[in-house]
Each structure stands twice: as C-alpha cells, then as structure tokens.
Amino acid sequence: MTRRSRRPHWAALSSAICFLGLVSSCSSPGGGGFAPREAGAVLPAGSSSYLLFDATGISQRRGGETLWAKNYATGSPSAAGFDLEGGWACVGYSNQLAMLQLGDQEPRWVPSPEPGLYRSIGVRDDLAAITIGGNVHTVEIPSGEVVSKLAAGQWVAARGQETVDYALPLSRDEVVLLSSEEEGGFKEGTVMAFRMDRSQGTWRQTQDARFPAMHWVERAVSAGNDLYVAGLWEEMIPQAGGGMGRFEQTLIVVRLGLDSFLNEVLVQERVDTGTKVLDVSVGTDALALLFASGEVRVFDLRSRARLRREFFPGAESIAWAAEGDLVVLAEGVPKIVSYGG
C-alpha cells in the first residue's frame, strides 16, 4: 500500500456508551469529511430498548413494541449524543436542543446556543459539546446553560487543519477535538485529536495525537474512556504501463485512549471508492458501522473479526440495543438485527 458524575444503575452498560451525530460525509477521490444532514436517529436506552427520534416526535421501543411516544412538530434532528453511564441524551434540532434523561418520557427543550445544523454532539456525564458553525459550545444538561465556548474552527485552522468534526466534553474546562485536513493538490489529508483546557483562564492545548493511517474523519463515537474514530484512507494505485492509475479507499477505525492519548488501529478494510460512513455504534462486545449505501458491517471488539455484513436500503441510523442485537433505522422503520453466532 502506498500510504499517503455517573449514575450507578447504568454501570452495567458503561461500555455501551455511544455518540450518534447524524451526518453524511463528503468523501470522494481527493477529499472527504463531515457534512450535517437532517435524518431520523436511534439511540440505545438500556434494558434492550432504544429511543427513536424522527420528524414526528420521540418514542421509546423494545423490539417492535412502543413503550411510549410523544409527538412534536420539530422536524428531524441533525445530531444526537448520549452517555448511557451518565444517563443523559442530547438531540439537536435547527434551533433547539432536546435534553432527555434516559428512563424519562418527557424531554426538556432548551434554545440552541447557535442556530443551524449541528456537525456533532458529544455527551459525557451532564455535559454536551455542541459543534456548529466552527464553534464548540459546552452546555450543561438539562438546563442548557452554556458553560464555555471555543472558536475551534479558527484554532485548528491556525494549526493547518480545515474542519472541526467532533468534540467531547471531559469537564466544564476540558474538551477533546477531532479535526481533519482535507486533501488537495500534492498534500495528503491528516486527522488530529487535541485535548483543550481553559482552567487557567484561556484555552490551551495540553495533548495532541495524529492518526497516521487516516486521511479524514467520517464518524466518531465515545465509549467509556475511549474514543472510536472511523475514517478513510485514500491512495492511488499505479496502472501497469503508466497512466492515471485508480483510486482505492480503505475504511480505518482507530481507538483513542482519552487518558493516555495513544491510538491503535482496530479495523482496516477495503471499501468502494466514494464510500460514506453515516453512523457508528459501540456496544459491550461489538462495533457497527453504517454506510450511505445501506451496508452495515459489524466487528467483534475483542478479536476484531467481522461478524456480519448486510444491506438495508434507505438506512439512516444504527444503535446498539443489547449484546448480540443492533437496531437499524431503515426507511423510517426500526429493525432489530442480530449479529451473534
């Protein structure tokens, strides 16, 4: 290859923490990245149930059974994040946020810190990092109070990066940023993670990590003290006898330790050129990826072997439901998909 404070009754599900921001990538030969998109979303809610957010409202379901449903004239969300261990979900609509304590049946609606479509929402404990318009707003859940704002787009641009794709709050004074530098001309894209701290009054970088096997970020998901980053590696394969050659893309999934800031490659598989990763979900035992083509690939977190590959036309979102089960939202209908032996 030519390379170019937690709630104890959720403790049993602590490794199933998952971020879900509904975006589609703009990947193509020579470049890629995030682009916000409004669509339905599914989030795990514990006890084999899941939450469904769509243009009609919010509901909690288990299998095909609806446990409760609320109708809202909000349209579809553009990003969502949650922390099962902390017990909170935050879902972003065009001008407001829905804050929902997992187990409750009524969200709290608060104004968005900045109107528009969200690039991502990362939730940890009772904080959410909202990435929108090049800024990262850390807000308190469920009050919606903005506790900090970081002009992240300007900050990463000064360091040679082009986009801020995802942010995760570590505390009221710390966030982790993921950024991409798009490819172009004779340069290769790069992906960086930065730990930012403002405890001394102004934002400063305290740690950074480069992902050498990835050209741009497609999706990201947090689970406990790890961050899972799905992206693409693109290369030109020379043709025999000369000529332009052909583009090939490789799916890369990297796990970043939030304490050590060390990263390791978990998945490295060839994909079709032009692949877009719509969603990533992490459970206690497996990692699942949803592509814009409707393809779902599931990998064992321990052996890293692929457990399942299947297509779901019109798929929008994916979530871990329970060990051995995923829920896939396809053409507006949630479907339970088993991936175990």
Image (spheres, rainbow, N blue to C red):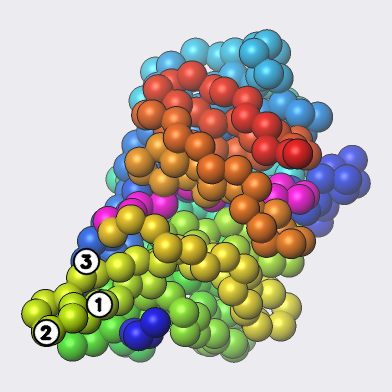
Q: Residues within 10 Å of mark 3 (few under 14, many from 20)?
A: some
SS label for mark 3: loop
Locate residue 258, reporting x and y percent: 68, 74
User: Which of the 4 image quadrants contains residue 196?
Assistant: bottom right
Q: How many marks?
A: 3
Q: Residues within 10 Å of mark 2 (few under 14, many from 20)?
A: few
Q: Is residue 214 magenta?
A: no
- Mark 1 or 2, nearer chain start: 1
Side (left or right) of 170 relative to 36: right
- Can residue 174 be seen here? The reply is no
Q: Identity of the amino acid at label 1?
A: Met
- Residue drawn 62% across and 79% down? 263
Q: Measured along the vertical axis of the image, is residue 194 above or below residue 57?
A: below
Q: Nearer the viewer, mark 1 or mark 2?
A: 2
Disc assigned to residue 236: 1
Q: Measured along the vertical axis of the image, is residue 144 above or below residue 230?
A: above
Q: CA distance from mark 1 to mark 2?
A: 12 Å
SS label for mark 2: loop
- Residue drawn 45% across and 26% down? 330
Is 285 or 262 nearer to us in this picture?
Answer: 285
Looking at the rendered image, the quarter that the N terminus falls into is bottom left
Residue range in magenta is: 274-287
- Residue drawn 46% across and 57% down? 219
- Residue drawn 45% across and 35% down? 311
- Mark 3 or 2, nearer chain start: 3
Is 147 or 115 nearer to us in this picture?
Answer: 115
Residue, disc 2:
242
- Can residue 11 be seen here? The reply is yes
Locate residue 123, reporting x and y percent: 61, 53
Q: Identity of the amino acid at label 2?
A: Gly
Q: Measured along the vertical axis of the image, is residue 328 above or below residue 308?
A: above
Residue, disc 3:
29
